[in-house]
Structures are given as C-alpha cells and as structure tokens.
C-alpha cells in the first residue's frame, strides 16, 4: 500500500490527538499549567458518552453531545475544586496537583466503573479507491489505492469542525479575544478590565468539551475503560508542546506531525523496531524543543 | 574559596558515622559467622525497608535537583534504570535473554554510575535551559523513550523478561535468609546514610547556597557573576549519578532487572515522598518517603479489616495516594518539615 | 538512621561469637546475645521465632494478627506450624496465599481466576478440607508489578504465614527468581507461559530430596506446548506462510516465539512480522505493512482490548485471509465486537482438555459471579486442588511437606482421582493417587510443568466452539524430553 494510505492513517490519528491537544494547550496558555489529569477528562467524557448511548437508544450524535457537555461540567467542577484555589502558586505545584488528581480520578473510575472494557456499538462502512495509479519512487509508492472508513471521515470531520469553531471563537467573540489577550499578557488584560477568572472558567469549560469529544471518539474506535484517556495523554502533551504550548493552531500542527510520525514510523522502521513508534513521537518532541524551544508556533520557553 | 574549611561539623558528620557504622555491622554479619534472627512478622518491613533505602538515594538526588536547585526532573526513574541495566548487563553471567558480559560486579557498578551520569550530562546539555515545566516534560519523555527501548530490543536488553542472572554479592556470602536480609538492609542503608552525609556537606557549603540562590532567583544569581548553567548542570548530574548508584545496587541486590521495576510509579513515589517531607531538607525528604512507603505498606494490612473486596480495596488505596499528593500541595506546599520561606511558597 | 518507617523494627538475634557477649541496643532494634554457643550451636538459635519464646515481641507484629489468616496465637508464625508440632488435632484452618492482579494492566484476567480459586476452596471444604482443616485463600494485589509482588509475597509468606502461594505471573516470577527461591515455599501458579520456566521449577523428579528443588510449579501449559499445538495444526492445514502481529508485552511475545520455533522448524515461513505497542487508538498502519506481504494466514497475539481494536481495523479495511488468534483471544467479546468477519478464526487453547473439566465447570458456574472462563481459569482450579491434595498426603501443611508431595499426588501411578473428595478418601485409605485436572491431566514433569492436548476452537455464530484437537502425544514430538 502506498504512502497516501499511510498519510490517511496518520491524519486520522492526528485528528483524535488534535481535538484533545487544543483543549490541553488552551489550559496551558491561559491557566499556565500542564494538566496531567487531562487524560482523565477524556475518560470521563467517554464514560458519559457510553452511558448516554446505552440509556438513550437514539442516534450516536446524542451520545457525542452528551459526552461534550459531560466533559465541560467535569472540567469546570474539577478546576473550581482543585486548580483555581492554587492558581497563584505557579506551574510546578499545579502540574504536581494534576498528577495526583489524575491518579485519584483514574482509580475512582475503576472503583465505580469496574475493570472490564465496554464498547460503543457502531456500524462502519468502508469506501475503496483502488483505481488510483501507483507512483513509485524507489521502493516507496507515493500514491496507490487506498480506503477510508466512515469512522475515519467522522473523526476527521469532527476535527475540522472543531478547528473552525475554535478559530471563530478566538477571533470573532469577545470571550475568545479576551482569551487571546490573556494568553499574551495576563496583567495587561486585567488592567484593560477583563474579568480574568471568568475567562479562565470559560477556558476550563471549553477544554472539557473538547476532551469529552476526543474521549468519545476514541471510545468509539477502541473501547471505554479507566485508561482510555490516560493511554493517550503523552501523545496529546507532545502535540501541544510540539506546536508551541499555548497556541491552538500550533497544537493542530503538532498533532498531525505526531500522527504522521506514528503512521510512517510503523510503516518504514525495520521490523525489529516497529514497537518503538511512541518513542519516535517523543524523540521528535525532544528534537523540536532543542532546535526551536518555542515549538512550531509559540513563545520562548527557555529561561537562560 | 575553600569549601573544606567552612564545613560545618554537624548533621552531615552524624550521618556519615551512622552510615559507616551500618556498613561495618552489615559487613560483620556478612563476613563472620554472626547470625541474626528476624521474627517473621517483621520480614515484610525489612523487605520494604530495603526498597526504602534504595529509593532513599533516589530522593536525595532528586532533592538536590529540585529542592536545592529548582530543576523539575520528572523522569528520575530513567537514571535509576540506566544504572541498573548497565550494571546488570556488565555483571550478569547467565542471563536468560539479552546481553550478560560477566565482568566483576564492582566494575559493573562503577560503569552503572558512570552511564547514569553520562545520560544526566546529555539531558542537561540539551535541556537544562528550558523553563521548569518543560524540563519536566523532556525528562518524562526521556524516561518513556528508554522504557520502550528496554522493552523493544529483546536481544540486547531482554525485553520484558529483562536481564537475569546478575550476581548477588551479599547473597553469595551469607547463607541464611534472616541474616542476609538484615545485612542487605544495613549495607544499603549505610550507602544511603553516606549519601545523606555527602549531600548535606555539599549543600551546607557555600556551593549549596549558590544552588538555593538559583532556585530563588536565577537572574540575580547570574548577575553576581555565577555561571548558573554550570551549577545547574552539576546538580543535575550529581542527582543522576546517585540514581545510577541506587540502580546498580538494586540490580546487585535483586539479581535481575526488568522493565517492570522502572515504571513511572517510581518517579511518582519519590516525588510524593519529597514534597510530603519538605523539599530542600535532606532528612525531611527521607522522612516523607518513609511516610508514603509506610502508608502503602500499612494499607496492605488494612485489607483484612475492611469489609470490601480486594479489587475495590486496591483501587481505593491508589485513590487515597493521589489525594494525599493533592492535599499536601494545597495545604502544606512546603511539606511537613520544609521551610516555606526558603522554598518561596505561600502557606 | 535507618529511617522512621521502621518504628516497629526489632530484631531478635542470636549471636554466637565465642568472645563477644556485649549487648547492643540501638534504638528499637536490639540484638539479643545468646551466649557463647559456638558455630554449631547457632543452628539452634536460628529458628522462626516460636510462639512461646517470642511472646514479648508480639506487639510489634500486630499487623499480622489482624489478618484473620492465622489462628489466634497472633505471633505471625506459620499458622500451620502448630499443626505439625503438636501432631494431634491438626490446624483448624489452613491459609494459602494468592498474589493477584486486582489492579493494573492485566486486572481483567483476574476475576475468572479468583472465581475458580474460590470455587475450588468451597469444593475442598465441602469434602471436609485438607487434614479436616478449613482451607482459606488470602488474596493480595500485586498489579503485576514485580516490586509490589516482592512485598506481597513476603507479606503472604512471613506475615500471613501461608505454606504455599497460588499465583504470580511470568513477569513477576522471572525477575524475582532468586528472591522467590530463597523463601523455599512452593509457588503453584496458574499464570506463567514463559519459556523461562520450561527447564526451571519443580522437584527434578526427586520428591524427597529438596536440595535440588526449584520451588515453582505451574498448572497452566507452557507456551512452548500449546503454541506447538497451534503451529502443528496450522501446518497440517497447509497454512505454510504466515504474517505475525504481536504486542511487545511479555506474554504476547513469548506466545509468538513459541509458535514460530515449531512452525519454522517444520517447514513454515514467516513472511512479515510487525510488533506494536498495546493500547493504541488504531493499528491501521501496522496492518497495512503486514498485509503488503504475501501469506496464507496471520497470527494475532495482543491483549484482548488491543486485539479488538486491531481486528476491527482489519475488518474495516477488508484485508481478509485466515486469522489465527493467541489463546487468550478465544473470548465471546472478540466475536461480539469484530462481527462476522472473524468467523473462521481459530485459536489453540490448552485450557479445557483436562479429564475433570466438567467437574470444574459445574462448580465454577455454581458460584456467584459471572466472570468469563479464560485460559487461566481451569488451571487456577487445578492449582488449588493439587496443593490441597499435597497437604492431605503430607499430613501437615508446611512448605517443605507440600513441596515433597506435589509430584506424588499428581504423577501417573496410583488411583486416578478427579475431585478433592475422591483424593482425600483414597489417601485416607492409604492409596497413592494421581490427580486428573480440569485444564490438563496435571502430571507434573521434573521441572514442575504440565502437559496437555490442545483444543482448536473456531469462531462462529455461536461463539468459539471446539472444532478439533491436537493430541498431547503429537505435540510431545516437538518438545524434547527433559527440556520441558
């Protein structure tokens, strides 16, 4: 199969990561913390989606919307309970709090949700395009026949919709513009009369909604269990930082870089090394931080 | 600037003497027909105690990095793992999988420490300039990369099986189990105490004041002419080497290494221990580590008195551990015995 | 300073240096000097503190007295020591220890094993229990983390005083091998498939001589055997070239390597092998790489959840070809989630071909709980019963006695027994017995392994159903005598 097919797989993987990474990076930019518990938000969203799908035998979009609302509620509640009170202490205590909170939530989910994986039932259609000509360069085929599934299209479509919505929010609404202002310079924003706490709360809700969406999409593709989100947190985090922490646009780029790197490294590494694909993603992260510490589109993160 | 002249003859020396005493008593058990007897009820405490003294070296190194210098290393386990693997691969004689070269163990231990220190040099050379939380991410990612390399390259690192057949110097000369456990605890505890003495000397000296100054305000420190990068790199490498030593000793005590011993759980445990006790205070971080490891152990005994099933209890135990971390940072950000002013945190 | 965690740390020691009689008191750790006994006299001192003489220390060990494992003597001794020493009535209860994966990555496998163990304990107690004592199992969580397993095993053996252990995975046993041998307590485990144990463990065919023993026994067929069965079946069905998709976890790799060693030695060819990390959101890239190669069938060895993701991807992409599954994947959930494309996939499972499988199944389904039977469930039943029979034959529940009797109660020769009740009766009549298990006939080899035929189950409308069987003798051809 050709490079085109690999690129499609990479784009789909990147789309999951991108939706979550936008939320992650917004929290980073506005609240100034690396939220290690963010994976658990995805998991909670996935659970809400699962229960909505089994309680209401309606169409799947109902479950997706429920997961997004659930994610938003969870996010603001946790922020009010755990993060807002220590907002002033700086990034490191907040990072550590999120690590502790992540452990606690993961095990609380296990306690109440049980151990076994649950599955959201879906039908998948596959569309094939076999007539595409091969364009071989050496042993690599640039085009070649490919297929996409309805799941792929759903994920990619959701991601594009999220990108548009976030873009419009940040450029066309007062809240969004205030968010960007705060991300640039918080004290200046406060001087200009922006209610910084309100903006922070909005960011928490928005990040939670995105986490819920990403979580339920991952759940449809894989399953719902207490580690659904946790197993992806390192990829999300890498994407956000790769793109330049705090920048939603950078996070999107970062996510697709990671997605493509995962797909292509699985396809082309020597077969004894194919299990290393996530190490490849991290290696890219470290390389980017060293060459351009500000990430693809972000601010300087070196101190000295 | 002669650091030696100004050495305080205080706590560091007590620890040094205690450490040497431990080594001597441990050596006495190992080398003479002297035999000890442990009541079996205490076995598990000695067992966890041995793990504690090994992790003790980790937390002392980490505290040098974070507590004293402000470097947020969230991949500490990688230096522990590299020390352990290097030692194990050099010393192992008949490993089931992976490489075992069968060199004498003292050489292997030395190489383990050097390997960890070199990795420390590499990480700090590339990342020490990053902002605190980004350094955390780079170190975390480094740990993940090494973990997957250890798992993936079966022919070299033994995959998930790890390196087996590592010589156990103490077990080789002490026959009976009780004495061996006690001797192991004493010898490894001796190493930890000597480490405590060494880091206490280091941080009580003017050198330590520079480190704390960097933590408090790097810009000011630089403006008085100190090369903060050099100091930071040194602190980072010392911590890495200590973790390598702990890893090498662990390999020689356990007789095998495997990826399962070097998960992110180790990093989380030493971090919680350090924060709970109070960063920048050597004894406090050890006490904090003792509390968190003790809590885990004691909670194991709780299973029989709680009316819930084992799996509910297991999840509940971890939930509480997570909440303890959250609570400490929120309500005692300087830890139990830490100095809030020195750490620059609001109480 | 050793550390504040050892507040209750106390050491009672016997020091037998001829000239050294000073008493050393160091914090709360103290060594009691036992005079100048000389080296020979030492052995008398080195005992596991008996109840009477350690009375003063009991307060410090109170953690164990609340465990409910031992009788009321509360000293943390082997509860069963009493039984052997006073000889008369025997112990009221005998507790066995079960390290378990109650949390962590493999926790979904534990419910079946717990339920089988509990069913076996109930079955044994209904028949009066070993030595007329009530059998108990103390289950503690290791999360399949070797560091935790170390602590848990120590706690079970030393604090709970169990004379035998009924658990531990390969990834715990292998790196803790030396440590576990030091305890000299038999470990009868239903979990490990690792080839590491092929030549390690058991009594080396000399039950009475403990000096050459390695204390691990497994009641589950090793990967070498049942993967051989699957490989033989594949070759018999003209599946001569193979693609392999496997996870990098210990069990998954071990399965594939066992399979391939027989497969390739007997004319099979591997066209492509792709290793993947588990827990990914998609395996499409790995599959597309795999299916670029030309082969008759592909072998999938992944943990269940990742396997379902991968097989869904395979089904969506419409790659086709014959799937061969590793035995843990022969589960209803796989068919439910992947759908009809998986029909025709087969797995070679060692777990259900024992002579007393029906006895097990009846007792198992009579329990509360609805845990699905997996490849380790019948072996867990066997582990419990064979250990109880060893206690019964030994007449006492000490580690050494159990170790000496595990071989004799299981090996051929003697009355074949299918339940604990039959075995107990035969032993009380002075007969020798050979326990016939539910997963395998449980004839422990010299290395403490068991051997059995392999059932081929194929996925279809009604779930996985047994469609063929590779007899044990056929597999024996591929596994050298003495090397398993």
Image (cartoon, rainbow, N blue to C red):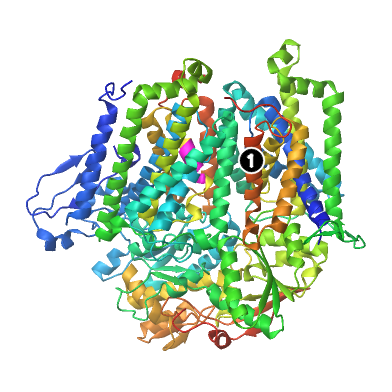
Residue at figure coordinates x 54%, y 67% from the top left: C116
Q: Position of residue B136 (x, y in %)?
A: 56, 35
Q: Nearer the viewer, residue B284 or C207?
A: B284
Asked if residue C275 lies in the magenta stretch, the reply is: no
State which quadrant residue A287 falls in: top right
C210 lies left or right of C425: left
Other residues around mark 1 within 10 Å, as few (<14) / some (14–19) / many (≥20): some
Say whether residue C223 is visible.
yes
**Magenta span: helix, strand or loop, mainly?**
helix
Question: Element at badge 1?
Answer: helix
Residue at figure coordinates x 78%, y 51% from the top left: A54
Q: Is residue A56 above or below residue A304?
A: below
Residue at figure coordinates x 24%, y 56% from the top left: C49
Q: Is residue B143 above or below residue C344?
A: above
Chain at tag 1: A
Say whether residue C397 is visible.
no
Q: Position of residue B289 (x, y in %)?
A: 41, 38
- Residue range (magenta): B265-271
């Amino acid at each position: 199969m050709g490079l085109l097919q690999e690129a499609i797989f990479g784009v789909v993987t990147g789309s999951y990561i991108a939706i979550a990474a936008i939320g992650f990076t917004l929290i980073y930019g506005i609240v100034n913390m690396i939220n290690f518990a963010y994976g658990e938000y995805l998991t909670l969203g996935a659970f809400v989606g699962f229960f909505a799908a089994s309680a209401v035998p309606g169409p799947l979009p109902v479950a997706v919307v429920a997961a997004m609302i659930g994610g938003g509620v969870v996010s603001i509640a946790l922020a009010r309970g755990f993060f807002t009170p220590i907002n002033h202490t700086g990034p490191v205590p907040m990072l550590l709090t999120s690590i502790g909170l992540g452990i606690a939530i993961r095990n609380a989910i296990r306690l109440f949700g049980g151990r076994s994986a649950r599955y959201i039932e879906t039908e998948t259609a596959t569309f094939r395009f076999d007539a595409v000509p091969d364009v071989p360069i050496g042993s690599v085929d640039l085009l070649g026949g490919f297929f996409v599934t309805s799941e792929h299209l759903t994920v990619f479509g959701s991601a594009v919709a999220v990108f548009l919505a976030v873009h419009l929010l940040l450029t066309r609404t007062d809240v969004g513009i205030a968010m960007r202002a705060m991300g640039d310079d918080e004290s200046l924003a406060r001087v200009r009369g922006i209610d910084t706490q309100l903006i922070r709360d909005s960011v928490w809700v928005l990040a939670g909604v995105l986490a819920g969406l990403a979580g339920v999409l991952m759940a449809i593709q894989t399953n719902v269990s207490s580690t659904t989100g946790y197993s992806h947190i390192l990829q999300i985090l890498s994407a956000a930082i790769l793109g330049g922490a705090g920048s939603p646009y950078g996070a999107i780029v970062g996510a697709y870089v990671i997605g493509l790197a995962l797909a292509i490294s699985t396809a082309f590494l020597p077969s004894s090394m194919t299990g290393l694909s996530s190490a490849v993603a991290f290696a890219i992260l470290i390389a980017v931080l060293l060459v351009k510490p500000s990430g693809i589109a972000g601010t300087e993160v070196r101190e000295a | 600037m002669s650091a030696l002249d100004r050495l305080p003859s205080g706590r560091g020396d007590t620890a040094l003497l205690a450490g040497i005493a431990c080594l001597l008593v441990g050596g006495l058990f190992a080398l003479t027909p002297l035999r000890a007897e442990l009541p079996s009820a205490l076995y598990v405490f000695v067992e966890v105690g041995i793990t504690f003294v090994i992790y003790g070296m980790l937390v002392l190194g980490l505290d040098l990095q974070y507590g004293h210098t402000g470097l947020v290393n969230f991949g500490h386990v990688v230096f522990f793992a590299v020390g352990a693997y290097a030692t194990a691969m050099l010393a192992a004689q008949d490993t089931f999988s992976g490489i075992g070269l069968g060199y004498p163990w003292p050489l292997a231990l030395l190489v383990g420490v050097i390997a960890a220190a070199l990795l420390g040099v590499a990480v700090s050379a590339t990342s020490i300039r990053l902002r605190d939380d980004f350094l955390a991410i780079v170190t975390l990612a480094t740990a993940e990369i090494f973990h997957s390399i250890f798992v993936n390259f079966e022919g070299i690192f033994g995959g998930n099986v790890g390196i087996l057949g590592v010589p156990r110097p103490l077990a080789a000369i002490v026959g009976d189990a009780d004495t061996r456990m006690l001797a192991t605890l004493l010898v490894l505890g001796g190493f930890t105490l000597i480490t405590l003495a060494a880091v206490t000397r280091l941080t009580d000296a003017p050198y330590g004041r520079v480190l704390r100054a960097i933590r408090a305000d790097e810009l000011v420190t630089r403006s008085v002419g100190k090369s903060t990068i050099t100091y930071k790199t040194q602190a980072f490498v010392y911590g890495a080497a200590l973790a390598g030593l702990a890893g090498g000793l662990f390999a020689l005590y356990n007789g095998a290494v495997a990826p399962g011993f070097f998960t992110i759980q180790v990093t989380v445990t030493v971090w919680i221990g350090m924060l709970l006790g109070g960063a920048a205070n050597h004894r406090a971080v050890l006490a904090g580590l003792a509390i968190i490891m003790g809590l885990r152990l004691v909670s194991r005994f709780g299973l029989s008195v709680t009316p819930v099933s084992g799996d509910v209890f297991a999840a509940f135990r971890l939930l509480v551990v997570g909440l303890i971390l959250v609570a400490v940072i929120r309500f005692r950000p300087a830890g139990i015995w830490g100095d809030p002013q020195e750490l620059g945190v609001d109480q | 300073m050793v550390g504040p965690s050892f507040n209750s740390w106390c050491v009672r020691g016997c020091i037998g240096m001829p000239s050294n009689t000073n008493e050393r008191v160091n914090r709360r750790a103290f060594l009691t000097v036992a005079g100048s006994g000389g080296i020979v006299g030492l052995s008398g001192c080195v005992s596991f503190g008996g109840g009477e003489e350690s009375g003063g220390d009991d307060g410090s060990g109170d953690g164990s007295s609340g465990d409910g494992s031992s009788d009321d003597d509360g000293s943390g001794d082997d509860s069963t020591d009493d039984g052997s020493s006073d000889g008369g009535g025997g112990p009221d209860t005998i507790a066995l220890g079960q390290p378990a994966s109650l949390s962590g990555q493999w926790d979904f496998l534990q419910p079946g094993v717990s339920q089988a163990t509990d069913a076996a304990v109930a079955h044994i107690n209904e028949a009066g229990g070993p030595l007329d004592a009530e059998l108990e199992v103390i289950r503690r969580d290791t999360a399949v983390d070797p560091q935790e397993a170390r602590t848990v095993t120590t706690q079970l053996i030393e604090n709970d005083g169990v004379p035998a252990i009924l658990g531990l995975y390969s990834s715990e046993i292998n790196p803790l091998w030396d440590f576990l041998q030091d305890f000299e307590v038999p470990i009868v485990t239903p979990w490990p498939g690792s080839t590491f144990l092929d030549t390690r463990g058991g009594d080396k065919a000399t039950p009475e001589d403990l000096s050459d023993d390695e204390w691990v026994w497994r009641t589950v067929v090793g990967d070498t055997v049942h993967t051989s069965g699957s490989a033989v079946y594949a070759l018999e069905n003209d599946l001569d070239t193979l693609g392999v998709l496997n996870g990098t976890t210990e069990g998954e790799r071990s399965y594939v390597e066992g399979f391939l060693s027989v497969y390739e030695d007997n004319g099979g060819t591997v066209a492509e092998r792709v290793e993947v990390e588990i827990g990914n959101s998609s395996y499409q890239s790995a599959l597309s790489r795999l299916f670029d190669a030309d082969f008759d069938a592909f072998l999938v060895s992944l943990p269940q959840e990742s396997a379902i993701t991968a097989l869904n991807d395979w089904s969506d992409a419409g790659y086709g070809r014959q799937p061969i599954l590793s035995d843990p994947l022969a589960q209803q959930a796989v068919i439910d989630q992947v759908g009809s494309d998986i029909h025709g996939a087969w797995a070679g499972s060692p777990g259900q071909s024992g002579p007393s499988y029906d006895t097990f199944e009846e007792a198992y389904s009579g329990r509360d709980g609805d845990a699905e039977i997996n490849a380790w469930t019948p072996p867990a039943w066997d582990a419990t019963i064979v250990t109880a029979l060893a206690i019964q034959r030994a007449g006492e529940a000490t580690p050494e006695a159990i170790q000496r009797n595990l071989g004799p109660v299981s090996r051929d020769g003697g009355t074949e027994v299918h339940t604990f009740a039959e075995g107990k009766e035969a032993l009380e009549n002075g007969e020798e017995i050979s326990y016939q298990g539910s997963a395998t006939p449980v004839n422990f080899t010299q290395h403490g392994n068991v051997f059995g035929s392999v059932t081929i189950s194929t996925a279809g409308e009604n779930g996985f159903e047994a469609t063929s069987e590779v007899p044990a003798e056929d597999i024996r051809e591929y596994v050298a005598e003495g090397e398993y």
